[in-house]
Amino acid sequence: MLLVRHGQTPTTGKVLPGRAPGLHLADKGIEQARAVAERIAVLHTPERPVAAVYASPMERTRETAAPIAAALGLRVRRAKGLVECDFGDWTGAELKRLAKLPEWRTVQRHPSGFRFPGGESFLEMQARMASAIDAIRHEHPGRTVVAVSHADPIKAAVAQALGTHLDLFQRIVVSPCSVSAILYGVDGPTVLAVNSTGDLRALAPS
């Protein structure tokens, strides 16, 4: 499973966009999406082709997935479970303002005990993401699949695969258009890469 964060948007690092509609990739994000498509394409071989490309319903993920799917000769499939965390009342707020709230320390240090006002909890987000990944895996058993999602859901999925408590998931970095690779086997998941922004050839089966 190749988990790809969407490309940069005009609000990346400034605002908590959440599930608000209408947020598209910035020019930089479009470049990043094209670049990650080229990087993933090297893993698409006649012997072991990439089986499918999924994306969350948000515009920014679908726009990131489009060049990846095109490079692989596939179509983008939507998976609701890959969507961004529901930030509720915090949706659209500036990060610098949120960082001043007393609740922000809980978000960073004890996320498993936090629910966004009017939104979802981190535990619910992680469970939803895990369920979405399981559904995709069972649809394509033993195959390589691309899933384009968002930073927090990907971090939560990586933490779960590592056996790391959700309270430590903020220590994981997932940059725009980075690739995190997880091999799901009969004995459990193996994390092959996290936040990879370079050559992916090392992920090709030997």
Image (spheres, rainbow, N blue to C red):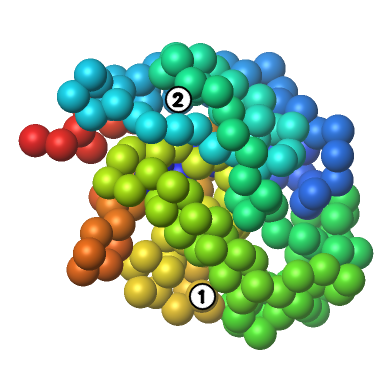
Q: Which circle marks residue 64 in the picture? A: none
**Residue at 39 percent of width and 74 percent of height:** 164
Would you say 197 lies left or right of 76 here? left
Q: What is the spatial separation of the Cα atoms under label 1 and label 2, in whole angstroms?
A: 28 Å
Position in image of residue 4 (x %, y %): 49, 39
Q: Earlier in the sequence, mark 1 or mark 2?
A: 2
Q: Secondary structure at mark 2?
A: helix
Would you say 103 lies left or right of 106 here? right
Q: Classify mark 2: residues with Cα within 10 Å, few (<14), some (14-19) or many (20+).
A: many
Q: Secondary structure at mark 1?
A: helix
Position in image of residue 82 (x %, y %): 61, 50
Q: Nearer the viewer, residue 127 or 173?
A: 127
**Residue at 23 percent of width and 19 percent of height:** 46
Q: Are marks 1 and 2 in contact (CB under 8 Å)?
A: no
**Residue at 54 percent of width and 18 percent of height:** 67
Q: Classify mark 1: residues with Cα within 10 Å, few (<14), some (14-19) or many (20+).
A: many
Position in image of residue 12 (x %, y %): 70, 39
Q: In the image, what residue type sits under mark 1?
A: Leu
Position in image of residue 146 (x %, y %): 45, 37
Q: In the image, what residue type sits under mark 2?
A: Val
Reading the image, the residue beneath label 1 is 166
Reading the image, the residue beneath label 2 is 36
User: Against 99, is 23 above or below?
Assistant: above
